[in-house]
Image (tube, rainbow, N blue to C red):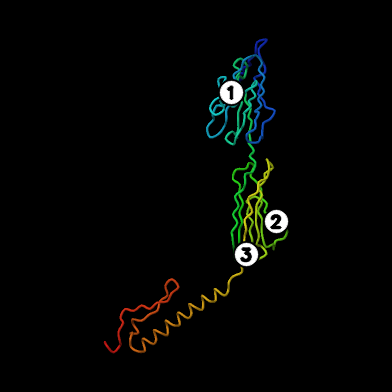
Amino acid sequence: LISYSCIFVLPPGSPSVPVTVSTNRPKVEVEEFSDAELSCRFHTETDPNPRIEWKKKAKEVSFVYFDGRFRGPFEGRATIDGATVTLHRVTQEDAGEYRCEISASLDTVSLGETNVTLNVLVPPQTPTCEVPASAVTGSAVQLRCRDQQSVPPATYSWFKDNKPISKPRHANATYLINSHTGILEFKAVTKEDSGRYSCLASNGVGSPKMCEAKPMTIEDVNMTVILGSVVVVFLLLVVCGCGGMLLHRNGLLTRRSFWISQCHGAAHISSQTLHRADDT
């Protein structure tokens, strides 16, 4: 068998190193409305004027810097120094992955690139707190606290009468606190749980924010009202039943046509025929 190989020899003075592109900060985190520097460094062997492009990678790749100027929403709010781009007053819309591309047509390998991820941090806003105004003793109750805008997501802590509610340390505690979802859950409330409740949202960015305290009152079950209602319904059924029996005994109703039904909590008499039995 005869094997062949091909060896490419560069002439003297030809570049042996392709364009190289790098960044000293592959991940950038800045607070909203501050400036973000996206670093891009490059080295070319022979091309003194390489083409510089910045792109943002999302569902579709869009140009940030192309053909010597900024494009789209970056126009007028970004600057470039060498290949390093600075975005001014960034918002959540600017967060994402960016790519710096350097094209050096005179180099052996003419294209190099590097990626930079931008995270825009947002401090907590005043959270929305849901506190029931009242509940009865023994019932399960949930209090909710939520801030939808903070980045990273906020964690939550609850206060009762301006005093922090500590996380339960044992499994049979009467309440549970989820610091990630912001839910304070009582398994069975007592009158001692009455008070003014507020919630604090924090995420390590900016100042924590607290919602306005809201009152919750725990009331005992009113057994007098419940027993009174039961007695009224019972007496109503007794009266209707006895009245029907008397009417039937006096021959005013036939056994076939008389019946008692209960509709929407009130008893009433319905009949198909209303006459004396001896009239038939």
Q: Residue at x 47, y 81 (%)?
A: 235
Q: Which residue is mark 3?
A: 218
Badge 3 element? strand
Residue bearing the label numbered 1: 53
What residue sits right under mark 2 in the picture?
Answer: 165
Of the pair 18 and 154, the residue shown nearer to us? 154
Give the mark nearest the N terminus, 3 or 1.
1
Q: Position of residue 268 (x, y in %)?
A: 40, 77
Eye-nearest disc, 2 or 3? 3
Sequence order check, earlier mark of 2 and 1: 1
Residue sitting at the far top = 12
Is tag 2's residue or tag 3's residue first in the polypeptide sequence? 2
- The quadrant in which residue 263 appears is bottom left
Amino acid under disc 3: Ile
Q: Is residue 269 above or below residue 147?
A: below
Disc 1 packing (10 Å; few <14; some 14–19; many ≥20): many
- Residue 47, image quadrant: top right
Give the amino acid type for the residue marked by disc 1 in the picture.
Glu
Q: Secondary structure at mark 1?
A: strand
Question: In the image, is residue 240 above or below residue 13?
Answer: below
Please state the horizontal and vertical placement of residue 248, each as a whole percent of the image: 36, 86
Name the side, left or right, on which 190 lies relative to 251: right
Within-10-Å neighbours for mark 2: few <14, some 14–19, many 20+:
some
Q: In the rendered structure, which amino acid carries the disc numbered 2?
A: Ile
Which residue is nearer to you in this view: 31 or 110? 31
